Image: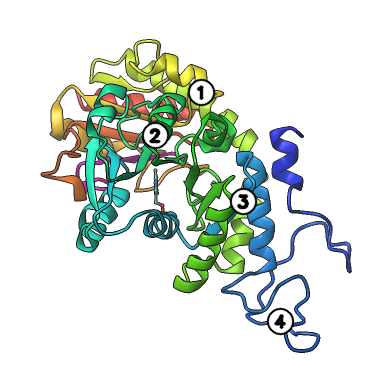
Amino acid sequence: MQGFSTRSIHAGQEPDPTTGAVTTSIHTSSTYAQDGVGGTRGGYEYSRSANPTRTALQECLAALEGGRHARAFGSGMGATDTLLRILLRPGDHMVIPHDAYGGTFRLVDKVLTGWGVEHTPVDLADLDALRAAIRPTTKVVWSETPTNPLLGIADIAGIAAITREVGARLVVDNTFASPYLQTPLALGADVVVHSTTKYIGGHSDVVGGVLVTDDDELAETVTFTQNSTGSVPGPFDAWLTLRGAKTLAVRMERHCDNAERVAELLDAHPAVSRVLYPGLPEHPGHEVAAKQMRRFGGMVSFLATGGREAALQVCASTRLFTLAESLGGVESLIEHPGQMTHASTTGSMLEVPESLVRLSVGIEDADDLLDDLRTALDAAR
Ligand SMILES: *Cc1c(COP(=O)(O)O)cnc(C)c1O
């Protein structure tokens, strides 16, 4: 197999056969001429069903995850919803991480329960807790690693073994790691989900999602269901995402370099009571992360010594770290999960600490990022 960067630049991206254009074209056409009824050229008939720019993106993302099939969506949640509607029926049960992405929890807890799907939040760092939560009706084990926003680590191979034993499917939301750092299919996952809005797009300028799987039959069902429900990305969005994917490896290396420096600074600062970063040796998931990830990623969370007020003050006083939701872009972001991304978990088992601050460490110069954080933390003491 070719190296990761070679695949990200070339997979699905041959020069155009008629013009020689080196970059993939943005195919805006909604419909395609047929050579006689049913005589499509390459299977394209209508852009909800298939679009050449989207096909290029899908081939690239499948190659990056080392999977046979990828299907691109209009958002990460569109991908998640389509997949769960395929894998679950009324009366079925799923396991969801106790600190799942807030939007995933909302979909499961507020939407799918209305269709009779049951769920149990579980700390997936604890394989015994997973075993205990499995029911005869469990069809899906949903996993995120690292988790958002607590940076918990789950042992993908360990969870895959249990999931296979009980005949359920393991889905891994690989958004935080990106395929550069971790490839769950190789560890036994059945499906990988990404919000491509984050590291894969990488520039905070496009929303999208993807499902990747080796299962031919499931991929066919995804194609059918997506065409039936319509949660497709437009060609401009597919193109922007593909453009972002080309530089994923170099961006991730820099995100990791900078995040390691940030974690070190936070670890030594009195305004911080605890740093949540799997790259730190004292992180409970450090060894598992070291085994299944290339490096430890660009996301760092921490608890402010001064509690909620101090956390809010840090969020309000950084200058380079922009106060905003989302993550994975070239620019550094800071947020307060309790009142922003994870507000929907308040009062539930998934509620996050009020002193929690989450950083998406960008690829600016590390020294500037450290100066910015140090100034904000000094003021919060
Ligand atoms: C953002 C995010 C999603 C949802 O993706 P959208 O593109 O916003 O719909 C799912 N999982 C994780 C871990 C995310 O960060």
Q: Secondary structure at mark 1?
A: helix
Q: Earlier in the sequence, mark 4 or mark 3?
A: 4
Q: Secondary structure at mark 3?
A: strand
Q: Residues within 10 Å of mark 2 (few under 14, many from 20)?
A: many
Where is 267 relative to 58, above or below? above
Q: How many marks?
A: 4
Q: Amino acid at mark 3?
A: His
At horizontal 43% and vertical 55% (from top left) the residue drawn is 83
Q: Amino acid at mark 2?
A: Thr
Q: Main secondary structure of the magenta part?
A: loop
Mark 3–mark 1 Cα distance, whole angstroms, equals 22 Å
| C-beta proximity under 8 Å, tags 1 and 4 | no
Q: Earlier in the sequence, mark 2 or mark 1?
A: 2
Please name the residue that numbered disc 3 is placed on: 69
Q: Amino acid at mark 4?
A: Tyr
Mark 1–mark 4 Cα distance, whole angstroms, equals 44 Å
> Can you say which quadrant of the picture contains the C terminus?
top left
Mark 2–mark 1 Cα distance, whole angstroms, equals 18 Å
Q: Residue 356 location, x and y as percent?
A: 23, 32
Q: Which residues are magenta?
A: 332-343
Q: Earlier in the sequence, mark 4 or mark 2?
A: 4
Q: Residues within 10 Å of mark 3 (few under 14, many from 20)?
A: many
Q: Secondary structure at mark 4?
A: loop
Looking at the image, is mark 3 or mark 1 nearer the viewer? Answer: 3
Please name the residue that numbered disc 1 is placed on: 292
Residue 32 disc label: 4
At horizontal 56% and vertical 55% (from top left) the residue drawn is 217
Mark 3–mark 2 Cα distance, whole angstroms, equals 21 Å
Please name the residue that numbered disc 2 is placed on: 163
